[in-house]
Amino acid sequence: MLIRKLSVVALALVVVAGCADMQGRQNQAAGTLIGGAAGGLAGAQFGSGKGQLAATAIGAVLGAVVGSNVGSKLDEVDRMRANQAHTQALNTNETITWNNPDTGHHGSVVPVRSGTTTSGQVCREFQTTIVVGGQEEQGYGTACQQPDGSWKIVSN
């Protein structure tokens, strides 16, 4: 029963974050979703069976809360530098770091693995680390290169 409740809470948190009017708060929404995914992934590493499910749900909720907090503190320059780092890392398939000396926020993007879809589209898994106020948050995702050369995140 507790496991179901935790799962419902975690799912509700993700749905609310995705559907809420986040105009002007895109960083907070992204932080919530990335934090929730990373927390769920971390929680899934513990226990087995129902215990693992509970750990996953708890990790997702905690990760979403932390991610929302981190995301809400990123300013426009932070977001711009992080986006530039993502683009450069995906284009070069190399680790790229970014830093905003005005806020002290920084991070990195590390391409982990590359592959090609059956249609020939290049995709890359990546790991993102963002440090805000000394608090580190990590996220994982996959981006695929579009026909115009840009990258689109297809999962996180």
Image (cartoon, helix red, strand yellow):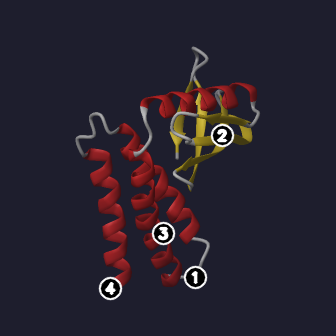
Marks 2/3: CA–CA distance: 22 Å
Disc on the earlier residue, 3 or 1: 1
Disc on the earlier residue, 4 or 1: 4
Kindly identify which numbered label has been placed on residue 59.
3
Disc on the earlier residue, 1 or 2: 1
Q: Are marks 2 and 4 in contact (CB under 8 Å)?
A: no
Would residue 108 appear left or right of 53 to someone viewing this image?
A: right
Judged from the image, the secondary structure of the residue bearing numbered disc 3 is helix
Judged from the image, the secondary structure of the residue bearing numbered disc 4 is loop
Q: Which residue is mark 2?
A: 109
Disc on the earlier residue, 3 or 4: 4
Kindly identify which numbered label has been placed on residue 1.
4
Residue 82 sits in quarter: top right
Disc on the earlier residue, 2 or 3: 3
- Seen in the picture, residue 34 relative to 148 is either above or below; the reply is below
Judged from the image, the secondary structure of the residue bearing numbered disc 1 is loop
Point out residue 46 in the picture as x, y percentages from the top left corner.
59, 78
Marks 3/1: CA–CA distance: 14 Å
Q: Nearer the viewer, residue 92 or 3?
A: 92
Q: Which residue is mark 1?
A: 48
Residue type beneath disc 3: Gly
Point out residue 56 in the picture as x, y percentages from the top left corner.
49, 71
Mark toward the viewer: 3 or 1: 3
Marks 3/4: CA–CA distance: 18 Å
Q: Residues within 10 Å of mark 2 (few under 14, many from 20)?
A: many
Residue that appears at 32% across and 59% down? 13
Residue 83 seen in the current view? yes
Mark toward the viewer: 3 or 4: 3
Residue type beneath disc 2: Val
